[in-house]
Image (cartoon, coloured by chain):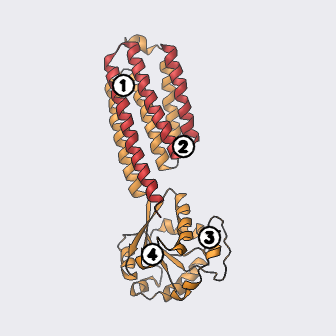
Amino acid sequence: MSHSAITDSYIYVIMALLPLAALMLVIQTSPYQALVIRGILGAVAALIYAVLGGADVALTEALVGTMLAITLYAVAVRSSLVMRLGVLSGEEVRKNLHWRPLLTYLRALLNRYHLRLELVTYDDVETLHQALKTKDVHGTCVVFGPTEAGHYPDEALSDGHGSPNPVPVDTPESPYLITLRVPRLYEIFTTELPPVMAQVQALGDDGLDDLGTGDLQPVLADASPLTEDD
Amino acid sequence: MTAVLMAMIAALLIPMVEAFQDEDIWQRMLAFASIATKTSVMILVVSVMRDDWMIGVVGVLILSVGNAALMLLAHVIRRLSEVMEEY
C-alpha cells in the first residue's frame, strides 16, 4: 500500500503547498494575520502527514500544533499588544466629545504598530501618577490649565486628525499632556504625534515629580521645551 | 481518483491566494475555514483511495478539530474588535 503511494505524482504537488504556506506566514507583519496563516500552515501540514502515512503525526499536528498553539498565541498577543493610558475619571473621557479627535488619532497611530489603546480611569491626579510610577499604566493623559476649558482647538482637530499638519485656531499648543514611561512609546509619540494634538513628555523628566502634589503648572512650563524639538 | 485529487489541490490554491492578497482579517478567516475543510476532505479522499481506515478516522477527527480551532480563533478576534470599537 504505502510503496505505491509514495510514487504517486499528486504527493509532490501536495508537498509544494507546505513551503508556499510557510512563506506566506513568514512575510506577515501583523500578529493576528500571522495567526490565521499559521492555521492554514497547520492544515496543510496535517494533510501532508496524513498522505505520507503518519496518521498519528497528523492528528497531533491538528490538535496541538494548530488548535492549542493558535489559541494560546491569540490570548498572549491579545493581552500583551496593548497600551494602557491612564486618564482622570472626572473628565468623562469616553463621553466627552473634546477627547474624541485625540483618541481617534492615538488609535490610528497605535494601530500602525499593531497596538490597541486601553483607557484606565483614576479618580484624582495623585492616584494617576502613582499608577504610572507602579507601572500599572504605560502612560497618562491629563488636561492642564482649567481656564483653557473654553477654547479647545476643536475645528483644527476634528477635520485634521488624518492630515499631518492640522492648523491651530487660536492656541498653538494642545491642552493635553501625555506622560509616558516606556522609552519606545515616547519615541513613537514624539516623532509621529503633532504637538498641536498633545504634548508628550517622558517619565523621569524634571518637574514631573511635582505632578503628584496636584500642582500642574510647573509641568506645563517644563513640558513645552520638549515638544519644540519636533 | 488521482484526477479528482489534482482538481482538489487546484481548488485549494484559490483560498490560499485569497488569504495572501486580502488584508481584511475576516476574509483571511474565511480562507482559513475553506482550507481547513478542503484539506480534511482531501485526507478522506486519500483514505478511500488507499482503503486505509486509519487515515480515514484521522481525517474525520481533523475535520471536526479544524472547525473547533477556527471557532476559538474567531471568538478571540471578535472580542478584540469589540474592544477596539467600544468608544
| Vertical relation: B9 (above or below) A38 | above
The residue where tag 1 is placed is: B59
* Numbered disc 4: secondary structure: loop
Left or right position of A170 against A29: right
In this view, the mark in front (2 or 4): 4
Q: Chain of mark 1?
A: B
The residue where tag 3 is placed is: A158
Q: Residue at x 36, y 30 (%)?
A: B62
In this view, the mark in front (4 or 1): 4
* Numbered disc 3: secondary structure: helix
- On whether disc 3 and disc 4 are found on a single subunit, the reply is yes
Q: Chain of mark 4?
A: A
Res B40 → quadrant: top left
**Disc 1 from disc 3: Cα separation:** 55 Å
Instruction: Give, as a three-letter code, the residue at label 1.
Output: Gly
Residue B23 x/y as whole percent:
56, 46
Q: Is residue B16 visible?
A: yes
The first of marks 2 and 4 along the sequence is 2
Q: Can you tell which mark lies on residue A92?
A: 4
Q: Contact (CB < 8 A) between labels 4 and 1?
A: no
Q: Residue at x 50, y 89 (%)?
A: A217
The residue where tag 2 is placed is: A27
**Disc 1 from disc 2: Cα separation:** 30 Å
